[in-house]
Structures are given as C-alpha cells and as structure tokens.
Image: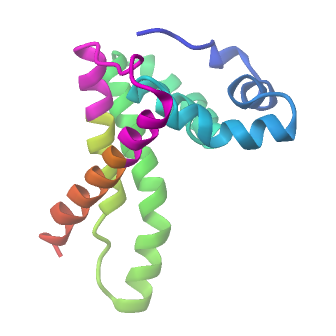
Amino acid sequence: MRILFDVFNMTLNEYIVRSLGKTPQEQAINFLAKPFGAPTFTEFWQYWNPVWSYYLRFYCYRPLRKFFSRAPAALATFLVCGLAHDLPIGALAYFSTGRPPLFTLTVFFALIGALMLFTEKIRFQFAFVPVGFRWVIHVAVLALFFQLAVWMTARQG
C-alpha cells in the first residue's frame, strides 16, 4: 500500500493543508474532489473528512498498531468510527422510543473497512477509470453497502 504522507508527525492544521490544500477555496473544492476522485477505496478513506480522520488515526489506529498488524487495527478503527456515529443516534432513539439501537452505521463501517482491506490485498484500483466515473463508483459502493447494513440490522430489530 502506498503511504500518502506521514500523518503521525503532523499537527491537525498541517494534516488538513496536506489533505485539502492551503486556501479555503482549495479546501472547499478538494473536500469532495479528492476522496471521490481517489483511485482506490483506501485513498478515499484517507481523504474523507480530514478532521475526523486525523483523530481516528492518532487516537485509535496508531495505539492499536502497537499491538496489532495493519488489518485488525484498521478494521477496529472502522468499528470505532461506526460506534461513534451510532451511539448518539442510538441513544436518542432509545430515549425517545425505548427500542435499543440497531448499530446500522457500525455494520456499515465494518463492511466498508472489510472492503477496503480486501481491495488492498488484491491490489484493486481504478486509476485507469476517468475521474467522473470514480465518483460514480464511490457513491455506488457507499449506497450499496449502506443498504446492505440497513438490511442486515433491520433483521435484528
């Protein structure tokens, strides 16, 4: 896997500039252009939401890497991300309806993390695909995996 940059030796501001650009205009354009134009699923997630990504890498992935190889640490980071998205939604749902949370986003992020690791393993990329079609691929994969997560968790509820 190609390392885009050494995030562990950067401040948050340096990380954002490196991920999205220096000016607010560059950052606004690159906020979607870089991840959705990425030639691999791994690069998509390296560019997606740089602020959240920075904290996940520094406070979750990096400590996990001290004990685990890349794949388990990355998958656990995706699970933590899913839980961080699900817990506030689940708590609101529980307190308003009394029903336990379904953890749909946790399942979604687990599926996405597994896809990312699998495509890394087989060295799958679509660099040869025009950038506009990469957007279609990323959106389609996100939508498909979200629907799969909804289907999987709805069966539990």
Residue at image position (31%, 56%) is: 146
Residue at image position (79%, 24%) is: 14
Judge from the rendering whether residue 141 lies leftward or rightward of residue 8; answer left or right. left
Residue 91 screen position, x and y as percent: 44, 75
* Position above or below: 94 against 26: below
The magenta segment is 115-139
Which quarter shows the N terminus? top left
**Is there any visible trace of residue 107 in the rendered image?**
no
Residue 60 screen position, x and y as percent: 50, 34
Residue furthest bottom in the image: 97
Residue furthest right in the image: 23
Q: Based on the displayed image, in which of its 4 quarters is residue 55 positioned?
A: top right
Residue 59 screen position, x and y as percent: 57, 33
Residue 30 screen position, x and y as percent: 68, 36
Q: Is residue 136 shown in magenta?
A: yes
* Position above or below: 96 against 134: below
Q: How many marks?
A: 0
Q: Based on the displayed image, in which of its 4 quarters is residue 153 positioned?
A: bottom left
Q: Based on the displayed image, in which of its 4 quarters is residue 73 positioned?
A: top left
Judge from the rendering whether residue 63 lies leftward or rightward of residue 19; answer left or right. left
**Is there any visible trace of residue 81 in the rendered image?**
yes
Residue at image position (36%, 21%) is: 126
Q: Main secondary structure of the magenta part?
A: helix
Residue furthest top in the image: 2
* Position above or below: 130 against 86: above
Q: Is residue 149 shown in magenta?
A: no
Judge by depth and name the residue closer to the eye, 39 or 22.
39
Judge by depth and name the residue closer to the eye, 73 or 134.
134
